[in-house]
Image (cartoon, rainbow, N blue to C red):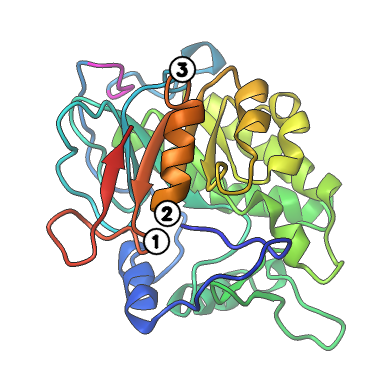
Amino acid sequence: MPHLSTVRAPLAPIAAPLLALALALTGCAETGADSGSRSSSDSGSRADSGSGSSSDVRPPKANAPFDYQLGGAYDPPDGVTTVVRDRTADPAPDAYNVCYINAFQTQPDAAVKWWQDNHPDLLLHDADGELVVDEDWDEPLLDISTADRRDRLAGVVGGWIDGCADKGFDAVEADNLDSYLRSDGLLDQKQAISFARLLTARAHAAGLAIGQKNAAEMTGHGKDTGFDFAVAEECARYEECADYADSYDDKVLVVEYREADFAVACQDWGDRLSVVLRDRDVVPAGEPGHVGKRC
């Protein structure tokens, strides 16, 4: 989902329809169960490849036309060869498919209740026992503060990763790597890297590439952490695209949400990186408000 870092100026608040959309696309609950059907592909999909190993991992191609479909799946536009979809969706046929997971925070509302009912101690609480919440998205943070909690969380999130593999996705993007910045000082970057290493190992064991999502300040640790590519929201707007490009050999999926920033991204990076302009609510094609352009 579009991410608002605490080190950036906040954008407009999320409207109620967007919150409802977020609930719909995540199935209103976090589960560790594997589900969904497999999808075949003639352009690099890992369907039918089995659980795989790190030798099976293939990141998306640099500068390949892509689409960002977190708000709901739809037929990819002509020429698009890489598609990002939520883990509750099925992969797009005949495409390289990236599976979105919210790895460091929960989804809002009903998902929070699932965590409270099943793993209450894996949610981050402050000294008063209150949940620590990313207020921009109303998403409580997961507690990655200790090795034991990280291991247990990796079991839950790892189940989602395995589910992406079972459906036939080629890769995952692990959102909210930088959630420690919104933890009121209760989490730190070292803990985020340690948890990310567990997730990258799980993805590679399942035969999936895994992408660093945002957190340009952590690109120097990316490959050491095990990430294979990056998904960078608004890197042209914040002049961060070079950080991702240099760290991941141009294997970067850039999402811009403003026309002016998209124009800059295309001018400066369109011949090297994959760039798309999307509406901030990432609504499906054919619905009011949908925006989808490529360089």
Q: Quadrant of residue 187?
A: bottom right
**Disc 3 marks which residue?**
58
Which segment is the magenta one?
Answer: 43-47
Do residues under tags 1 and 3 come within 8 Å of each other at their CB atoms?
Answer: no
Q: CA distance from mark 1 to mark 3?
A: 29 Å
For label 1, the residue is 280
**Along the line of sight, the residue nearer the viewer: 110 or 120:** 110
Left or right: residue 74 versus residue 173 is: left
Magenta segment includes 26 = no
Query: Which SS class for mark 1?
Result: loop
Residue 152 picture location, percent across and down: 68, 53
Quadrant for the C terminus, please.
top left
Residue 45 is covered by the magenta coloring: yes
Query: At which x and y percent is residue 261?
Result: 48, 47
| 30 over 68 or under it: above or below | below
Q: Earlier in the sequence, mark 1 or mark 3?
A: 3
Amino acid type of the residue tagged 2 in the rendering: Tyr
Q: Residue at x 41, y 40 (%)?
A: 263
Q: Nearer the viewer, residue 197 or 236?
A: 236
Q: Residues within 10 Å of mark 2 (few under 14, many from 20)?
A: many
**Residue visible at 32% across and 70% down?**
21
Q: Earlier in the sequence, mark 2 or mark 1?
A: 2
Label 3 element class: loop
Q: Main secondary structure of the magenta part?
A: loop
Please state which of the two labelled residues, at mark 1 or mark 3, is closer to the viewer.
1
Q: Amino acid at mark 3?
A: Arg
Residue furthest toward the top? Answer: 55
Residue sitting at x 74%, y 51%: 150
Q: Are marks 2 and 1 in contact (CB under 8 Å)?
A: yes
Q: Which residue is mark 2?
A: 257
